[in-house]
Amino acid sequence: MNDLKALCSEIEAVARKAAEFIVKESTVFNISSAELKGLNNFVTYVDKGSEKMLIENLAPLIPEAGFIAEEGTSVKKGKKYNWVIDPLDGTTNFLHGVRPYAISIGLMEDNDVIAGVVHEVGGNETFSAWKNGGAWLNGKRIHVSGTEKLSDSLIATGFPYNLFDRLAPYMSLLTYLVKHSHGVRRLGSASIDLAYVAAGRFDLFFEYDLKHWDIAAGMLLVKEAGGKFSDFSGNTENLTGDETLASNALVYPEVLGIIGKFMKGI
């Protein structure tokens, strides 16, 4: 893949086109039309419509590429390239008319994410990154924060909505972090949390039981913005969302140790 910067611009345009559809539907959407995929796991015709638009407009960019998409609109698998798509990250927020919610698009080459775009629909912010090209917000370079200690950090997380077997240690960890940081925020969109880490708005983010489409683009954003990304044990390879820890490089060792004490091996 030669010109990843130019490709990112095309991905941004695709995301913005789908965002126009989401914005339009947000003015007429009725929560009674939502479907339930599992416990507290919702999907709407807006998710499905956005995904269909994304697939239709991404497909010509790399004809041989397949798709790993949350709603399964396409089952095509590519041998080398695959798009990893969350068409509406923050569906529950959308259901209730609460921001943020976002479109997340990552491009994988084999097992490596080489391009990623997270478009925050309500705020019209487009975060993008390509391999070895840095991380960007609406065309301006972004970097992770320079915070050195957990005690000076603003933290983002996500609460489990249907997998509660790790809830007790998670709540113990949350209690510790509330007492030893500037605060903890829960926005309801993992891709936005990761984009905000990349932009230095949050110093760190952690969550468990995410999916590949939640983290693919955000993972590249954090890395290209100078941050660290791993599971709760510090592993950095073949991450798909089961455990997610992202932060700047300075606070990462301290945070990894603390999260490990509460969550590792659970």
Image (spheres, grey):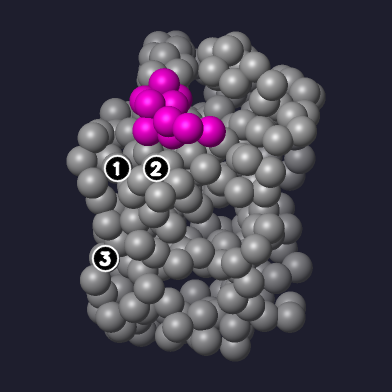
Gap between marks 2 and 1, in whole Å? 6 Å
Looking at the rendered image, the quarter that the C terminus falls into is: bottom right
Between tags 2 and 3, which lies in front? 2
Residue corresponding to mark 3? 145
Q: Earlier in the sequence, mark 2 or mark 1?
A: 2
Task: Find residue 221 and report its horizontal and vertical position in percent.
Answer: 41, 49
Q: Earlier in the sequence, mark 2 or mark 3?
A: 2
Q: Is residue 127 magenta?
A: no
Residue corresponding to mark 2? 129
Residue lying at 41% horizontally and 21% vertically, measured from the top left:
10
Q: Could you say whether the residue bearing mark 1 is in a helix, strand or loop?
A: strand
Please rate how many residues cluster around mark 1, counting C-alpha atoms within 10 Å: few if below 14, some from 14 to 19, many from 20: many
Q: Are marks 2 and 3 in contact (CB under 8 Å)?
A: no
Q: Is residue 3 magenta?
A: yes
Please rate how many residues cluster around mark 3, counting C-alpha atoms within 10 Å: few if below 14, some from 14 to 19, many from 20: many
Amino acid type shown at disc 1: Trp
**Of all residues shown, which one is farthest toward the left?**
140
Residue corresponding to mark 1? 136
**Of all residues shown, which one is farthest toward the front?**
2
Picture quarter containing residue 152? bottom left
Between tags 3 and 1, which lies in front? 1
Q: Are marks 2 and 1 in contact (CB under 8 Å)?
A: yes
Picture quarter containing residue 21? top left
Residue lying at 65% horizontally and 58% vertically, measured from the top left:
239
Task: Find residue 141 and report its horizontal and vertical position in percent.
Answer: 23, 46
Q: Could you say whether the residue bearing mark 2 is in a helix, strand or loop?
A: strand
Q: Which residues are magenta?
A: 1-11
